[in-house]
Amino acid sequence: MKKAIRGRCLSYRGNPFADPVSDCLQYEEDGLIVIEAGHIIGFGPASDILQEIGPGVTVTAYKDALICPGFIDCHVHYPQTEMIGAYGKQLIDWLNKYTFITEQKFANKDYAVRSVKVFLKEMLRAGTTTSAVFCTVHPQSVDAFFEQSAKLNMRNIAGKALMDRFAPTGLKDTAQTGYDETKKLIEKWHGKGRALYAVTPRFAPTSTEEQMEMTGAVWQEHPGTYLQSHVSENKAEIDWVKELYPNHKSYVDVYDHYGQLGERAIFGHAVHFTEEDFRIFSETGTAIAHCPTSNLFLGSGLFQLERAMTGTSPVRVGLATDLGGGTNFSQLVSMNEAYKIAQLNGFALDAHKAFYLITRGAAEALYLEDRIGSLAEGYEADITVLDLKATPILDYRLDHAETLEEQLFALVMLGDDRVTRATYVAGELVYERNHETGDTRFIGI
Ligand code: GUN
Ligand code: ZN
């Protein structure tokens, strides 16, 4: 059954950091998106497309709205949902004091399922339709995630954390069990429906050299899978890596040495990157997940976005929440904080570039730009509808914004999950927020 969505539509088909926005932007003042079997089969000006689709197609029209590709979160930890915003010190203390305590509870699958449900609902409420997700060390935490994700038919990436040292006993695997469990989970989940598997070494400090070796091997043995981890987030963490891996030139060199860089490898943070680090990422096609709310919350530092995108060694970058180090599910909030971090680095991130970083840019970071992240024929129909009258101040501010750029920037500064009016996954409505009352409804979870 064909259906269609009508309204103002915003999408990018190129990278506005590299090319003029006019070459990258597809904006339709009155656009129509035609959907069939979970895919977009037509997109363009409503006046043109309506003539092509013929009668009998249900059209849902959104007034005072902006229709976008579903948002993409390039790095997030679902088990940390319950400890979002936990007060404390910086990364290593925070991991030991809160994270490693919380994650032990995910040995219990029912516990994990309850957490996944809350997490996925918050994602849909935020208008996020794809995420790259860290589960815990327990394989059942991965099963819990993918089982619930499959019910919603979401294109999500996830994997079991690999960690065999410097963690409580209940959170440790071994090089061999980590390898075996990862292999089994890949066979079970990668490519099943819309699920994609990420080999997930937590970060170099919590893996022995033996585990690093076997992690690189299991990833290389399964082409098409992802690898996700953390790098150069915090100064004390970087010093620790130097101590633990004294024979390596740098933190990045550790991952390089163990065969963990390349296409479909994505690393959170990269806050303290050198020119050499950017060069290696650029040359290997490795991507960065920029995690603004987390980097501010944990006092990690100011990511050099402009340098990463437009320096001599450009890197694929997508925005990410990194929850529970991150403090908000909404990628609108990530854009807001990314803007402020860029400002402190002397770069004023404009709204088109920001929206690109949570849609097409994030899809490029995940090597999924041929399937998601844009509104275009043949793409998967993951769509987020933003309510331009969601709050009184947004409504009032937008009344005084003249250009599209000004309107988008007001959304970046004033937006959060209240702005999500509807979320569609593979063409199906899964979440909506009533325009007038603010009441919300989930469908399918
Ligand atoms: N480095 C290793 N594990 C984590 C984590 O859970 N969160 C963050 N922000 N950094 C990490
Ligand atoms: Zn993280």
Image (cartoon, rainbow, N blue to C red):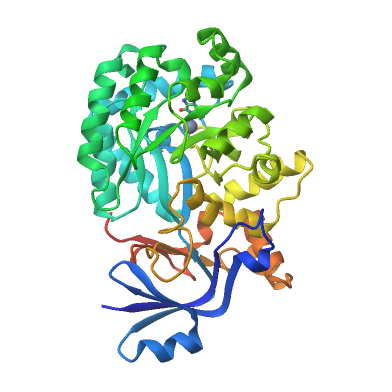
Q: Place residue 378 in its image quadrant.
A: bottom left
| Front residue of this view, candidates 65 and 39 | 39
In percent of the image, x 58 and y 69: which residue is there?
389
In percent of the image, x 27 and y 43: which residue is there?
190
Height in image: 307 above or below 167?
below
Q: Position of residue 361 (x, y in %)?
A: 55, 52
In percent of the image, x 45 and y 40: which residue is there?
263
Q: Position of residue 373 (x, y in %)?
A: 47, 58
The residue most toward the front is 283
Any part of residue 109 in sight: no
Q: Place residue 264 in its image quadrant.
A: top left
Height in image: 276 above or below 331?
above
| Front residue of this view, candidates 273 and 116 | 273
Q: In the drawing, does residue 268 fall left or right of residue 34? A: right
| Front residue of this view, candidates 350 and 434 | 350
In percent of the image, x 69 and y 47: which residue is there?
339
Quarter of the picture containing the C terminus is bottom left
The residue most toward the right is 346
Quarter of the picture containing the N terminus is bottom left
Tell how many labels: 0
Q: In the drawing, does residue 406 fall left or right of residue 377? A: right
Q: Place residue 119 in its image quadrant.
A: top left
Q: Position of residue 118 (x, y in %)?
A: 35, 44
Height in image: 164 above or below 299?
above
Any part of residue 38 in sight: yes
Q: In the drawing, does residue 411 fall left or right of residue 113? A: right
